[in-house]
Amino acid sequence: MGILLAESAGSSILMANSFLLNQFGYTSEEVTGKCVTWLIPLLRHITDTAAMEYYGIRKNGTRFPVSVSLKSDEGSVIIFVTDISDQHIAKETLRALETAIEKKEVPVTLSLPEAAAELTQNIKDLRIKNDVLRQLNKTLNNIWLNINTPLTFIRPDGLLMGINPAGEKILGYDKADLLEKQSVLIFHDPEEIALRADEFSQQLQEVVEPGINTLTIKAQKSLLNESEWVYIRKDGSRLPVSISVSPIYREGNIDSYIIIAIDITDRKKAEEEILKTLENERELNMLKSRFIALTSHEFRTPLSTILSSNYLLSKYQTTADQPKRDKHILRIARTVTMLRETLNVFLSVEKIEEKKIHVRNSTEETHKFVAVIVRELEGLRRGSQQLRYSHDGLPDAYLDHNLLKHILMNLISNAIKFSPETGIIRIHTISHPEKFILSVKDEGIGIAEEDRQHLFERFFRGSNAEAIQGTGLGLHIVAKYAELMKGDVICNSEKDKGTEFIVTIPSPQN
């Protein structure tokens, strides 16, 4: 299926896929920047996103019929173009048969195969040597028997009078159970019929009752009657189709209708993929912008701190100034540690996205391992904050201790940042044969209830955390690392009273 991307139906082409380029005989360079109407002249007049029929112009100047549908997407439009030449050939063949019937060259019969048989017999009996009519008969039978598209003949009241082999196969019915027994509405969802009746009532400015009239009202008025529907197969499964309803006349009155239903499953999937790709691209651009804003802030502030402390160190040259020098040396050391951790955060996210992190379990004395990490993070404390660690259960655990280290560092550094300078941060671990549990509890500002559902999203920051430095990536990393180890993370929090994160990691041996 051909796909165009443009600002609007009548504006310049931004992108065309290879299928469309092959359809029209152009290269990408030849169409990019050209107006859409250069390929499909009447497209600027489209006002409906549903499939409509137009004609396209190939590079060699030839015209061909196309079905066009639109999807608007925030300042741009995706145009789906389908070559319907085969469908038009089928329609013209059926119109020719209708003309032959009106001229009484063939009798009206109950089904298309019977009409074709009668046509052949009459040609023999009446010794008609009309090559056009003979070719029509042959073409009609070939279409009916071989086209891989459901075709149905119905009476004006909707009663099924004919269904081709493809219709039986695709919809799962035997014609013996349908013909002269069931309405074509057996293929339709009553709710969709009701919705379309309302839609057509507004378009036509008259009441359209739900039922067979919904399918045929436009054909009755000689209006273009092609739209997207969903057929319901015998097994209850659903099939998206583009339906064209054409009337067949006899002596100036509508005698029956032919319905051509083209499977548009692939087109729908392509539309969904295009929309998904555009959404992913939008999200990526948004993430890039947020990443640049965050990284510039996260690095600019610490670097400014280092520069100012370095400048002040150069001013403190006497022995009496040693305490001041020590203060700024410690300040530089803490800032460098913070910068290193920020870099680790960004590198961790990159590895997660590229699926480069693999779980490597080992058995270690986990309570000692955690105690070492807690001591390393003592230097990040603010004011008189305290880190208190306790452990219960087995002394060791079988898990990926490197991933556990990153989980701990992110949770504890967060607790330090969001706790008051007099706060106590409690770290507790429990090691069971079947699982390992880590709890980090603070007395900080807490997390608003409406923010909790977004906690583990990339770059998310709580509504009450704007003034506190951070990347919005720490909890995302915690959740992803826990997930890699088949574990989970639970957050218990109350605004202005503190937060507790509980990470549970099942033992791989279980």
Image (cartoon, rainbow, N blue to C red):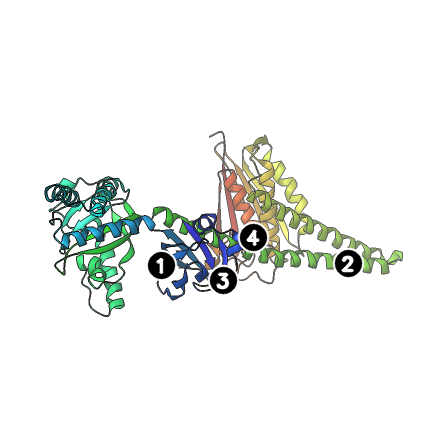
Along the viewing direction, whichever of 160 and 144 lies nearer the viewer: 144
Q: Residue furthest right?
A: 318
Q: Secondary structure at mark 2?
A: helix
Dot 2 alpha-carbon crowd within 10 angstroms: few under 14, some 14 to 19, many 20 or more: few
Q: CA distance from mark 3 to mark 1?
A: 18 Å
Q: CA distance from mark 4 to mark 2?
A: 32 Å
In this view, the mark in front (2 or 3): 3
The answer to whether the residue labelled 4 contacts the one labelled 3, judged by CB atoms less than 8 Å apart, is no
Q: Residue 54: give its label.
A: 1
Q: CA distance from mark 1 to mark 4?
A: 66 Å
Question: Against 237, is 420 above or below?
Answer: below
- The residue at which mark 2 appears reads as 307
Labels 1 and 4: the sequence-earlier one? 1
Q: Residue at x 41, y 59 (%)?
A: 40
Dot 4 alpha-carbon crowd within 10 angstroms: few under 14, some 14 to 19, many 20 or more: many
Q: Is residue 449 visible?
A: no
Q: Is residue 224 visible?
A: yes
Q: Amino acid at mark 1?
A: Tyr
Labels 3 and 1: the sequence-earlier one? 3
Q: Amino acid at mark 2?
A: Leu
Where residue 409 appears, as percent x and y from the top left, is 61, 46
- The residue at which mark 4 appears reads as 442
Q: Amino acid at mark 3?
A: Ser
